[in-house]
Amino acid sequence: MSTRLVYVCEGGDCTEKGSVELFERLRNMLHEWDPEERRIRVRKYPCFGGCEFGINITIWPDRIFYSKVGVEDLPDIVAHIRGGEPVKRLTGAVRPDVEDIIWQMLDSPW
């Protein structure tokens, strides 16, 4: 099983909405489950381009794009990462072409 990556947007709009705190909380929650980051790594991402729908989080290679994420959503996101179903209420906010651009960049070997 390869390592999955969770990216939390740290663009200006998302930062103003609390992405720094959300990143720290999510990283701590996942660190309890996977302290050596063998299954999941949480990283910051400069901007996904879905600013009006922030805070945005992606899970790669799953191609899950979560939007309008709040701290209260983190337990459901963690449950998904640990093997549960994706959190549907947090998907589908950004335009499909915005998501496609992100997946193309994350899929790139460069």
Image (cartoon, rainbow, N blue to C red):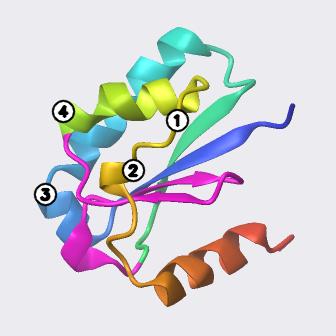
Nearer to us: label 2 or label 3: 2
For badge 1, the amino acid type reads Glu
Circle 3 residue: 17
Q: Which residues fall within the magenta stretch?
A: 49-70
Q: Nearer the viewer, residue 93 or 60?
A: 93
In contact (CB < 8 Å): disc 1 and disc 4: no
50 up-or-down from 66: above or below: below
For badge 2, the amino acid type reads Lys
Q: Percent x, y for residue 6?
A: 54, 46
Q: Which mark is residue 65?
A: none
Compared across the picture, whether 34 is left or right of 38 comes to left
Inter-mark Cα distance, 1 to 2:
8 Å
Upstream in sequence: badge 2 or badge 3: 3
Secondary structure type for disc 4: helix
In contact (CB < 8 Å): disc 4 and disc 3: no
Residue at 43% from the left image edge and 69% from the top image edge: 46
Circle 1 residue: 85
Nearer to us: label 1 or label 3: 1
Residue at 41% from the left image edge and 35% from the top image edge: 77
Inter-mark Cα distance, 1 to 3:
26 Å
Q: Nearer the viewer, residue 17 or 64?
A: 64
Nearer to us: label 2 or label 4: 2
For badge 4, the amino acid type reads Glu
In contact (CB < 8 Å): disc 1 and disc 2: yes
